[in-house]
Amino acid sequence: MLQEKVIVVTGSSGALGKVVVENALVRGARVAGIDHAAAQIAPAPQRIEFGGVDLTDAAQARKAIDAAALHFGRLDALVNVAGGFAFETVAEGDPKTWARMYALNVTTALNASRAAIPHLLGSPAARIVNVGALGALQAGSGMGPYAASKSGVHRLTEALSAEHKGRITVNAVLPSIIDTAANRESMPKADFSKWVTPQELAEIILFLASDAASAVTGALIPVAGRV
């Protein structure tokens, strides 16, 4: 379903991004990773990484995605994993956190999507998959800035789907808590067995990026684990 597909994954060096990249490669895809961190992988026939890219800058996003499409000759799917998290109450938090969350979660996905669309329109099975958040459906205490920004990702997903229906499918996965080292460290008393693993989430993301998901667009898919 992904054999020889060309997929760009943003946030490719993060806990989820790495797993998405690895699973896409196993399925026969060719993958371009884009991350703010420096590139760690040497270019190979099936894989290339673009490091030091600030996706909140539209020009940098376009340069990296244009380079990925040029390297592989086309682009079939974009997976927007890049993002960030902050836990602050509305009354006591720093107003700058709201702008930072919007930049990391919404602006990165917006800039990458706008840069990818001209290339995706040349694919017969074009896909965009975003990472939203289950917590954005009903924000709890301390989740205001993060949930508001991820809600923006949900609306971006719906708008892009409507604008490109019949040409590009656009969907989002909405995970609860992802089982990462950082989340375990910040919530050491939690029951990790109930969390969504990066592998589980990657499976759903790559299904949405595959030919099998041709009839799915505009969907916000909850991935709640075992909560």
Image: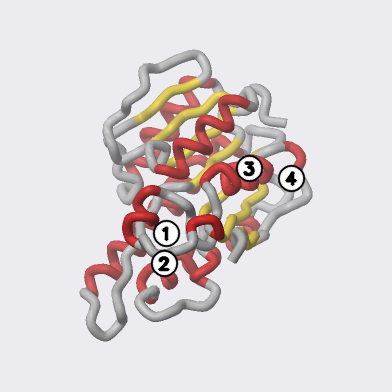
The Cα–Cα distance between marks 3 and 2, rounded to whole angstroms, is: 24 Å
Mark closest to the chain's N terminus, 1 or 3: 1
Any mark on residue 149, and which?
A: 2
Give coordinates of residue 216: x percent, y percent: 73, 52
Task: Indicate which label's residue lies in the foreground, 1 or 3.
Answer: 3
Q: Amino acid at mark 4?
A: Ala
- Which residue carries the number 4 mark? 213
Give coordinates of residue 175: x percent, y percent: 55, 59
Q: Amino acid at mark 3?
A: Glu
Any mark on residue 169, and which?
A: none
Mark closest to the chain's N terminus, 2 or 1: 1
Which quadrant of the figure has residue 59? top left
Mark closest to the chain's N terminus, 1 or 4: 1
Residue 118's place in the image compared with 181, above or below, is above
Secondary structure of the residue carrying tag 2 is helix
Name which residue lies at 42% across and 43% down.
15
- Which residue carries the number 1 mark? 106
Mark closest to the chain's N terminus, 3 or 2: 2
Secondary structure of the residue carrying tag 4 is helix
